[in-house]
Amino acid sequence: MEITSQSIGELHELLVTKRISAVELAQTMLQRIKHIDPEVQAFLQVTEDVALGRAAQVDEKIARGEEIGALEGIPMALKDNLCTEGIRTTCSSKMLENFVPPYSATAVEKLKSAGAILLGKLNMDEFAMGSSTENSGFFATHNPWDLERVPGGSSGGSAAAVAAEEAVYTLGSDTGGSIRQPSSFCGVVGLKPTYGAVSRYGLIAYASSLDQIGPITKTVEDNARVLREIVGHDHRDSTSVPFEIPNYAEFLNKDIKGLRIGVPKEYFAKGLDEGVKTVLHEALATLEGLGAIVEECSLPHTEYAMPAYYLIATAEASSNLARYDGVRYGYRAENTEDVLSLFKKTRSEAFGSEVKARIMLGTYALSAGYYDAYYLKAQKVRTLIQNDFNQAFDRFDVLLSPTAPTTAFKIGEKSGDPLTMYLSDVCTVPINLAGIPSLSLPAGFVDGMPVGMQLMGRPFAEGTLYRVAHAFEQNTDFHTRKPSLIKGGAR
Amino acid sequence: MKISRQQVEHVAMLARLELSEEEVAGYTVQLNSILDYAAMLDQLNTDDIKPTAYAVPLHNIVREDQVKPSFAREKVLANAPVAEDGFFKVPRIV
């Protein structure tokens, strides 16, 4: 099998048995990026020197006969809203086009300590606001399965890079589906951890009560390996939750006999593509065949999640993005006569259209006279949505739905109509409001495009999601199929 | 219409955004369509429901008030668009 197709475990084995060096592995991945990324355009920046330098250190360690960790020497890439010390971090915005962070995000620091090899920074919707990566301030990323289609968003670069085998794994961030929806569109495995499981320190904020960092990988096992390295309490994030970190690998290779799977009927309602629905029903039959107990259930407030999400997320965004004023870092407008015009010109020139729209909506929702009607109301509805999930988890171990109502759409197809674009996150948004963990994994194909199924679990029950996902994966072959773009060996 | 052109201009001022005529017109349409959509929340009676700000209940996260090293001034100023004599520089305020 080709090197770029291998899992983290397989590559680790090749490294420790010295069948490949870490430098050779990094070079292979860099070569792949050079050949394929002009078409996919997942990368904003390739950090070749950093990758080769770190890989050489890993090789020295192996040469000295020292043991290496599970992720040591394994090449990966990061969504460009994760701060990397000394390495430009743009959030795909003109606002941060030349921003070089003075520190790294905690998750990035943890991966670095684990010996990860950074290949580069990945494209995204500007400030993580979007569902297609078309809102990038620089260029659009293309879906490796069909270059005329979007990879999803906002972590579109992160999902496309894994699908095109340009990185062994990537990190993304998920505020309303931004890891899971692109993972579904690109046929890879993406996890949004429980809110508070992974430190948000150094993640450039969009909506602080919803944002989480998570891994995107080719397989469920890889995902569990990466998650284990990035979770944990961090005093630098006051919303980080202290909890005992499980060995997620122990949840793999377990049967799912008697496990109770709830299927919320609201997620199979109008707007769901017929092909996607068929794939999901086949997936449910597979899980039943493996001994799971599948039953329909109801999350009655589902339809209210999307409007509540847009009010809460934009309100938080309007506050978080107030920091971009042209004074301490980032873009600054020229020829301004006073401080007010400095702020206004800087922000107007450097923010893209969707970012401005969301700042406007959020500012309005928080403004005098409207706070109770919009922001407070949305927070109360958030409670109702959380209650729906709590009640469902009294009866079920996991819930299952489509990750997105359709497969990847065409580039340009929805960019003129923000509300239609928002609806591609209709299955993922409620989960962020509830703060629970959720994983998308390949469940089948419609007209050659991947379909993801979404598993939802109780807070901090990522292990249970992995158990179900791994059982499904081991009994299907969807995760082994590749886009024709990368078939047939090295290009 | 839930939000008028004048209100859009006012919100832009609050958000420190300078919008062109076309942008004001465009955002007036866009914000109205989203607010119309959000109006479905009014169907729900939430009088006795407590708001949720964070999904995980965390309260009063405090730490000891200890002096710890912070970033060096040069490191912080390295990203400043304009700095002078160890300070961020802005246009005249008063």
Image (spheres, rainbow, N blue to C red):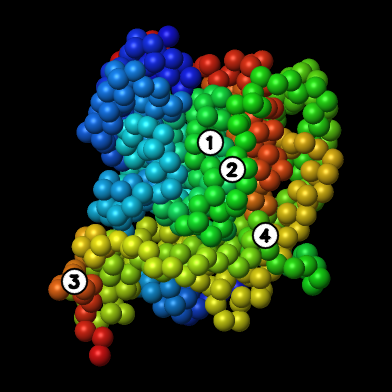
Residue bearing mark 4: B57
Residue bearing mark 3: B86
Decide: marks 2, 1 in contact (CB < 8 A)? yes
Q: Position of residue B50 (x, y in %)?
A: 75, 68
In the rendered structure, the answer to whether residue A318 lies left or right of residue A491 reads right
Q: Residue at x 82, y 49 (%)?
A: A391
Looking at this view, is A286 or A425 the one in front? A286
Decide: marks 3, 4 in contact (CB < 8 A)? no
- Residue A53 can be seen in this image: yes
Looking at this view, is A157 or A12 the one in front? A12
Q: Mark 3 is on which residue type?
A: Gly
User: Dot 1 lies on which element?
Assistant: helix
User: Dot 4 lies on which element?
Assistant: loop
Q: Residue at x 78, y 17 (%)?
A: A289
Q: Measure how far apart labels 4 and 1 are at the Cα level.
A: 23 Å
User: Given the image, what chain letter belongs to the residue carrying mark 1?
Assistant: A
Residue bearing mark 1: A227
Can you say whether A388 is above or below A255 in the image? below
User: Dot 3 lies on which element?
Assistant: loop
Q: Position of residue A81 (x, y in %)?
A: 40, 49
Q: Position of residue A239 (x, y in %)?
A: 56, 58
Looking at this view, is A159 or B30 the one in front? A159
Q: Measure how far apart labels 3 and 2 are at the Cα level.
A: 41 Å
Q: Measure how far apart labels 4 and 2 are at the Cα level.
A: 16 Å
Q: Mark 1 is on which residue type?
A: Leu
Res. B51 image quadrant: bottom right
Q: Mark 2 is on which residue type?
A: Pro
Say few, some or many: other residues with alpha carbon within 10 Å of mark 4 (under 14 / 14 to 19 / 20 or more). Answer: few
Residue bearing mark 2: A193
Q: Measure how far apart labels 3 and 4 are at the Cα level.
A: 41 Å
